[in-house]
Image (cartoon, coloured by chain):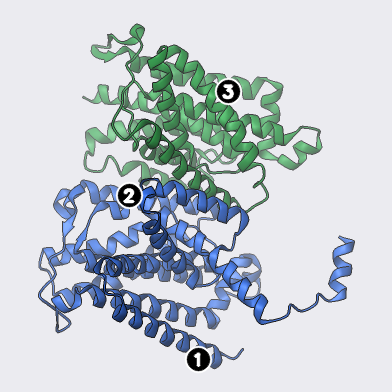
């Protein structure tokens, strides 16, 4: 019971890694807490459903992030960039309005009934892992999470653009004085963040069913992750995502009554102890 | 303007609004319209609560639905277990939640900016989760039917639950709340909180204790919201976890923004506009939230002061010729 829960916690944690790294990236460059991120995730999942039913899962996994990336470019160009000098709270509310529009769009196009995407054939079997029989797809989810975390870390640490991103998220003004086009960089980062939301959606599609309420659970958990990890901090988000997955999984075994409340208790404790989250402002 | 004059104006406004409400209650005969108006008025009180926090503390709460739902739940649990009379239950719930808001305020208002929004979001969701999980206490996802007694404060319940009486009851609650809050904000306390909101450090330098006033605003905000919850409990005789979901807090916040929070009546106006236009769009009702989402974006981007701000500007322009800008300021502007 405990080991299978820990495993499932790891799977959910991996999904949250993909989800919240996008949120953290966008916050880092644009200082926007994107309420629409959960709806973008949902849109990604539904787009994935359509693409996968015409082609296959793997095509969807490439096409959806690309489409969502384009949407992200538009989002930055027409929302975040014109509003960058406004009060951060107004931008939050704009993303809240966007959330309402996206939720309605998804319900109108795909309807309210639950849909499901079958796992790709390659991963549809069950695998024996430490004496547990687990669906191979869930192991793949952990793998996807690792790949995303690894790729983002490499990109931010070792590429020139990653250096610019880190610089711009700590000191946007000075970075642009040094000749970096922060607006274009932010556009790219918002595109990457949105693509990651879409990727999280298509990753989640085969093991969580698609429904109009799928966004609201995940977005709150992702907020808990990015706030606990330190808004804008990628490594903090990775750690917090895995921690949250485990807190929920282990909580479900030992404190079943309180399992759903634990993440919020965790978040409140961290916020009161260190309002900037446990990683502070480091990227 | 002297304080007596301000208070006189507030009292006049309250009397006028009460009279206007009476006219509506007496002339509107359609039960559906009255019920809709009551609902809008209750949410107007909710929005007033959220608006006070934003106006006086500059803080955006994503968790006020907790106070709203708590109002219903405290009364429901007290009555269901027959712990006290309905009158006592109402009083206990009101002051109990006020005390709770005060205590929790001491902790949460220390957290600045966006983190405050996230913290209130987490707190609100915590209440939502507790309400939907603990079946013994709250009836879980099914909610609780509130067993109101036959008489309340010596009046027959059938008299109180008539749609016109209900509307007037809620309307009086709204008008009196706005009146009380307006009087408070016109007092020294209101000025103090504004000073703290605009620059906490400077306020501290001139000797103002800055934490307590902010906690008191949070308390006031939570208490007004709880009042809305109590009214809703009375109108529907039912409370469910859905009333505590964060999307409810978000909806109230939208009403505040659309109505504009510079004026105290702005959020209330936003709530009434929300309900009335939802009724008007009729056939498109299923796309209602998307329409409101677009409206929200448009208001934030093009009219940050909301409907009340736009209305006030319209009337002021008609009433008085704008004073010419002094030459000195012109020169200063040119230089910068």
List x then y, in percent, for residue A264. 37, 45
Image side of residue B81 versus residue A16, left or right: left
The residue under label 1 is B8
Chain represented in blue:
B
The image quadrant where one finds the C terminus of chain A is: top right
Look at discs 1 and 2 and give the one toward the viewer: 1
Image point 39% across, 55% down: which residue? Answer: B249
The residue under label 2 is B126
Q: Chain of mark 2?
A: B
The residue under label 3 is A153
**Closer to the camera in the image, A241 or B51:** B51
Chain A rendering hue? green
**What is the secondary structure assignment of the residue under circle 1?**
helix
- Mark 1 and mark 3 in contact (Cβ < 8 Å)? no
- Mark 2 and mark 1 in contact (Cβ < 8 Å)? no
List x then y, in percent, for residue B8. 50, 91
**What is the secondary structure assignment of the residue under circle 3?**
helix
- Check disc 1: other Cα within 10 Å, few if <14, some if 14-19, many if 20+: few
Q: Chain of mark 1?
A: B
Residue B80 figure quarter? bottom left
Residue B153 figure quarter? bottom left
């Amino acid at each position: 019971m405990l080991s299978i829960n820990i495993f499932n916690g790891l799977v959910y944690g991996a999904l949250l890694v993909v989800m919240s790294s996008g949120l953290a990236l966008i916050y880092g460059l644009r200082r926007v807490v994107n309420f629409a991120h959960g709806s973008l995730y949902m849109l990604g999942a539904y787009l994935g459903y359509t693409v996968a039913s015409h082609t296959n899962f793997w095509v969807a996994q490439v096409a959806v992030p690309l489409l969502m990336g384009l949407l992200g470019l538009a989002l930055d160009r027409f929302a975040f960039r014109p509003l960058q000098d406004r009060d951060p709270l107004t931008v939050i509310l704009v993303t809240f309005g966007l959330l309402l529009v996206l939720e309605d769009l998804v319900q109108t196009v795909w309807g309210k009934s639950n849909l499901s995407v079958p796992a790709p054939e390659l991963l549809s079997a069950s695998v024996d892992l430490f004496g547990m029989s687990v669906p191979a797809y869930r192991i793949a989810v952990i793998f996807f999470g690792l790949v995303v975390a690894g790729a983002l870390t490499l990109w931010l640490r070792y590429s020139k653009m990653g250096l610019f991103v880190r610089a711009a998220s700590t000191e946007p003004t000075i970075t642009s004085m040094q000749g970096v086009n922060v607006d274009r960089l932010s556009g790219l980062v918002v595109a990457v963040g949105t693509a990651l939301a879409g990727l999280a959606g298509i990753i989640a599609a085969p093991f969580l069913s698609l429904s109009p309420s799928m966004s609201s659970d995940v977005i709150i958990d992702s907020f808990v992750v990015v706030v606990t990890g330190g808004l804008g901090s990628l490594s903090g988000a990775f750690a917090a995502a895995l921690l949250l997955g485990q807190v929920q999984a282990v909580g479900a075994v030992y404190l079943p009554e309180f399992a759903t409340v634990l993440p919020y208790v965790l978040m409140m404790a961290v916020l009161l102890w260190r309002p900037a989250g446990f990683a502070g402002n480091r990227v | 303007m002297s304080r007596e004059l301000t208070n006189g104006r507030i009292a006049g406004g309250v009397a006028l609004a009460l009279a206007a409400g009476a006219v509506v209650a007496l002339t509107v005969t359609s039960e559906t319209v009255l019920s809709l108006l009551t609902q809008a008025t209750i949410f107007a009180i909710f929005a007033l609560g959220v608006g006070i926090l934003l106006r006086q503390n500059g803080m955006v709460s994503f968790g006020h639905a907790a106070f709203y739902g708590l109002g219903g739940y405290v009364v429901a649990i007290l009555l269901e277990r027959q712990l006290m009379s309905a009158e006592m239950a109402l009083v206990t719930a009101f002051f109990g939640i006020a005390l709770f808001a005060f205590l929790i305020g001491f902790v949460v208002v220390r957290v600045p900016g966006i983190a405050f929004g996230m913290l209130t979001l987490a707190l609100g969701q915590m209440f939502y989760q507790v309400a939907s999980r603990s079946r013994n206490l709250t009836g879980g996802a099914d909610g609780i039917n509130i067993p109101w007694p036959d008489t309340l404060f010596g009046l027959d319940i059938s008299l109180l639950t008539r749609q016109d009486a209900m509307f007037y009851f809620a309307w009086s609650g709204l008008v009196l709340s706005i009146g009380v809050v307006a009087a408070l904000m016109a007092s020294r306390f209101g000025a103090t909180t504004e000073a703290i909101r605009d620059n906490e450090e400077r306020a501290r330098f001139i000797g103002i204790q800055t934490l307590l006033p902010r906690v008191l605003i949070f308390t006031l905000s939570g208490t007004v919201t709880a009042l809305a919850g109590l009214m809703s409990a009375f109108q529907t005789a039912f409370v469910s976890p859905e009333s505590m979901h964060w999307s409810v807090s978000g909806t109230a916040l939208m009403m505040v923004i659309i109505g504009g929070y510079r004026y105290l009546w702005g959020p209330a106006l936003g709530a009434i506009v929300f309900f009335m236009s939802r009724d008007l769009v009729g056939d498109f009702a299923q796309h209602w939230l998307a329409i409101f989402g677009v409206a929200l974006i448009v208001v934030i981007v093009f009219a940050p002061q909301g409907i009340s701000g736009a209305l006030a500007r319209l009337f002021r322009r008609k009433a008085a010729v704008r004073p010419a800008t002094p030459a000195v300021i012109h020169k200063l502007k040119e230089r910068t």
